[in-house]
Image (cartoon, grey):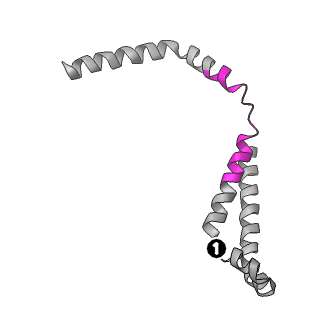
Amino acid sequence: MMRAVLSFFSVLAFGAMSAAAFIAVLPWLSGRAPAGLKAMTDGLQFNSVMLGIVFGLMLGSLGRYNWTDVPRRVVTWFLVRERQFFYYTLIAICAGVLLYY
């Protein structure tokens, strides 16, 4: 578990450093770029770059999960806690009767 967390944050740090380096080099590149390319690079903002990096990392980590196993795990989780859910339902019904009576 900890290895996955450290791996995620190391990739996030690499993406942030790459984005920061790109933004730092962008003014130098814009002086040597054609006029059509200058208009495209003026709208780049660091906040949107960081948000894109985070979303990309999240999609990458979600892609690693075995999604065919999720329904079986959910059903197993509900079956293990079936008695607790029954008691919680009874408590909610009793509370509803007391509240609306």
**Is residue 1 visible from the viewing direction of this image?**
no
Q: Position of residue 79 (x, y in %)?
A: 57, 14
Residue at 67% x, 20% y: name it: 72
Q: Is residue 44 above or below residue 86?
A: below
Q: Position of residue 23 (x, y in %)?
A: 71, 75
Q: Is residue 78 above or below residue 67?
A: above
Quarter of the image for residue 63 reads top right
Which residue is situated farthest in the bottom direction here?
Answer: 31
| Magenta stretch contains residue 95 | no
Quarter of the image for residue 52 reads bottom right
Q: Which residue is mark 1?
A: 43
Nearest the viewer among 80 and 20 is 20
Left or right: 89, with 54 as reference point: left
The image quadrant where one finds the C terminus is top left
Left or right: 50, with 81 as reference point: right
Q: Amino acid at mark 1?
A: Gly
Read off the magenta span.
Answer: 55-74
